[in-house]
Each structure stands twice: as C-alpha cells, then as structure tokens.
C-alpha cells in the first residue's frame, strides 16, 4: 500500500487496463454465466452496502431473499419451500449434503451421484468427510444409470443426487427414478439444477426434475446463470424448510442469534439483482429468453454440421457438444472430460455472435 493515494481517474484507468485483458463476452462460448441483465445491475447498486449475514440490520434485503426463494420454489412446483441464497451451486450442494448427513446420521456416510456430477461434490467429500460414489452413465447416453446407482447404495448412504442440465452435456437425469430409489431406501434426494433450473421450466414438454417429483428433498438453482443476475448468486431450495435448522450455529453478537448459512457475511446486492430480473421478466420473459437461446443453439448446430462437424448428441438445452476438432483462434470453447467440444449458448451469445463464429469457422475449411 502506497503512503499516499491516487486520484480517482488514475485508479479507474488502472482497473480499466486490467479489465481490457479479460476475454470479451462476444467470444465466450463456454461459460454458464452471462452478462447481467441491466435491471440486475441497477438493483445490485441499490443494495451494495447490505449484509444478509446480519439480517436484523437489513430487514428489507432479508425480505427480498425470502421472496426470491418463494418465487423460485413456486416455479419449481413447490409449496412453502425453504432455503436461502448461496454464493453459487458449490455452496448449495455442500449444504444439501450436510443436511442429508444430519438427517441420516451414520459413522461413515456416503452419497451416490452421477458420473456427470459437478466437481463441487469432490469438495464436499473433502470438507465433510463424506464418501462420494459415482454411478456410471447409461450405455450410449450421458444420463445416470439408475440400476448401477442402486448397487452403490448401502446402509451408510445418506443421499442420492441427480443432475438436471449437467455441466458437460446439458442432459437431464431420470429424476423420478432417482427420487423413487431414494424413497425406497428412506434417504434424501438432491437435484443439482444450478444450470437447468431456469431453463427446463421454459422448454416445451420439460422433463420432470423438481418438487413436482415425489421424493425430491432439495434443489440447487443458480440465478447467476440463466437468471442473468449479478455474480455470485445461487440458491438452495428445500422441500421441508425446517431442515435448514439442522445447520444452525449460535451467532450471539449479531441481531439474529442463530445462523445456518455456510458463509457469514453475505451481500444482499446479488440477491436483489436476481429478484429484480424475475419480477421484471416474469415467466413470459424468461420463456422468450430461453426460446432465443435454443434457437441460437439450433443455428450453431446446423452451421457446424454443414461444415462436417459431428455433434455428440441432440441438444436438450442450450448446450451443444461436438466431437473434438480444431477451432478458430480467439474463441473460448471448453472441452468435456471425454474431450468433446462444449458450447453453451447463453443470452450473451446472440445470433450475431453465432454467425461471427461460423464465419471464422468457414475460413478453416
């Protein structure tokens, strides 16, 4: 730290230089996060000084969090859903497993998750000492083999997980089958819908994945993905609100004397941003956003197939996967663990962005 500070102009110019080194969204085809909606930015600015970690001081921000959970719970066919706004899907998954382990105490707890499960479950294992058992894909598919999953369950299994819109292939596990399996063993069923939670409800004939499915205990949903809120904003949604109390610890010096969140200080700004987008767009608006993303996904697929690139599977959501090939320089495209090319058609990937990419791809032919 320098003895004397810099002028405002100097500081902002310095920061702008670093920001210019970041990849522009116009060339990001691999991220499940996107440019925040303009109303999210305005709402975020209103609540930058609020701390949900001490809700008695900021009852307005705390009420927005409750309304956000209620709105998302209703979207996912829940009644009186509980939960809270997390820093993202990783925290929500960790907390869901913590709850499951407390509901079903055993000396050597384990959870059974799909091979497609997010790497946050590895962190969960390390933090909580819970063994993670990975069930393989169905043959020729990228959804979990529930028969194989059933063979991994034993007396120490506290939860099963399913993924609704998995990170690598954008497919949806057979949630009803996984939830039924959990019910048969009297254990929890958690659905990681961090990405799919704000996509699947707005698709035509969506696959069942939420609280409409008997046996689903909890759902992870990230508004900072398709919800277009500011980063970071995730949520943990619980069918039984009282189960959140299992995570309570004393917080005697705060206005509220117990805390159940993983992190302490939590900004109300991103939560306000998420809620603002939901209120501003409504279901109709989200349906239009998802429809546009799906149309751009179809355009990308048709364009790449015209150049001879082979898709791995028919896209179910706004995520397309192709067999590996060299791509044009400057475009950010990720690869799955199996080496496939992975494209995520988020709201910032407009039709113009898709056409610019295809133009660059055509020059490689």
Image (tube, rainbow, N blue to C red):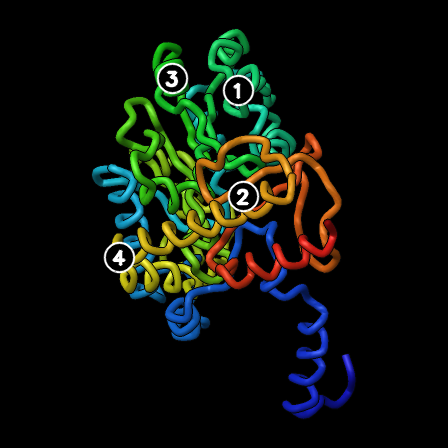
- Of the numbered discs 1 and 4, the one sitting upstream in the chain is 1
Q: In the structure shown, which secondary structural element does the residue marked by tag 1 occupy?
A: strand
Residue 81 in the image: x percent, y percent? 27, 40
Q: Position of residue 137 (x, y in %)?
A: 56, 19
Query: How far apart are the alpha carbons under marks 3 and 2?
Result: 30 Å
* Dot placed on the residue nearer the N-terminal end, 3 or 2: 3
Q: Which mark is residue 301?
A: 2
Residue at 34% over, 27% down: 216
Closer to the N terminus: mark 1 or mark 2? 1
Which residue, given by chain and number where applicable, does mark 4 sit on? 282
Seen from the viewer's position, the closer of residues 139 and 214 is 139
The residues bearing labels 1 and 2 have C-alpha atoms spaced at a distance of 33 Å
Left/right placement of residue 275 relative to residue 317 reads left
Residue projecting furthest to the left: 79
- Above/below status of 139 relative to 231: above
Which label number is shown at residue 143?
Answer: none
Of the two numbered discs 1 and 4 in the rendering, the one whose residue sits closer to the viewer:
4
Q: Give the foreground label among 2 and 4.
A: 2
Badge 3 element? helix
| Earlier-in-chain disc, 4 versus 3 | 3
Label 3 and label 1: CA atoms lie apart by 14 Å
Residue beneath disc 1: 112
- Horizontal and vertical percent for residue 225? 47, 52
């Amino acid at each position: 730290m320098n003895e004397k500070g810099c002028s405002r102009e100097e500081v902002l110019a310095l920061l702008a230089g670093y920001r210019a080194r970041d990849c522009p969204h116009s060339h990001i085809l691999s991220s499940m996060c996107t440019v925040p909606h303009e109303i999210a930015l305005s709402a975020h600015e209103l609540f930058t000084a609020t701390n949900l970690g001490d809700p008695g001081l900021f009852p307005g921000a705390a009420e927005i969090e409750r309304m956000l959970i209620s709105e998302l719970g209703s979207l996912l066919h829940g009644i009186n859903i509980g939960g809270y706004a997390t820093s993202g899907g990783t925290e929500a998954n960790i907390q869901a497993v913590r709850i499951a382990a407390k509901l079903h105490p055993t000396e050597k707890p384990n959870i059974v998750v799909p091979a497609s499960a997010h790497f946050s479950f590895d962190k969960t294992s390390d933090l909580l000492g819970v063994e993670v058992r990975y069930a393989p894909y169905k043959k020729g598919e990228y959804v979990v083999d529930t028969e194989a999953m059933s063979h991994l369950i034993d007396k120490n299994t506290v939860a099963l997980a399913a993924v609704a819109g998995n990170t690598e292939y954008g497919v949806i596990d057979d949630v009803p089958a996984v939830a039924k399996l959990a019910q048969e063993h009297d254990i929890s069923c958690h659905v990681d819908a961090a990405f799919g939670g704000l996509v699947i409800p707005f698709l035509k004939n969506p696959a069942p994945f939420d609280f409409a499915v008997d046996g689903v205990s909890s759902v992870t949903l990230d508004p900072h993905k398709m919800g277009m809120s500011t980063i970071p904003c995730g949520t943990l949604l619980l069918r039984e609100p009282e189960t959140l109390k299992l995570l309570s610890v004393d917080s005697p010096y705060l206005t509220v004397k117990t805390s159940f969140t993983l992190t302490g200080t939590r900004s109300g700004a991103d939560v306000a941003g998420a809620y603002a987008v939901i209120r501003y767009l409504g279901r109709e608006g989200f349906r239009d956003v998802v429809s546009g993303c799906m149309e751009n996904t179809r355009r990308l697929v048709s364009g790449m197939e015209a150049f001879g690139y082979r898709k791995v599977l028919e896209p179910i959501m706004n995520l397309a996967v192709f067999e590996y090939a060299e791509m044009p320089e400057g475009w950010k495209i990720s690869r799955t663990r199996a080496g496939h090319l992975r494209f995520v058609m988020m709201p910032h990937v407009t039709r113009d962005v898709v056409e610019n990419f295809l133009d660059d791809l055509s020059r490689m032919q």
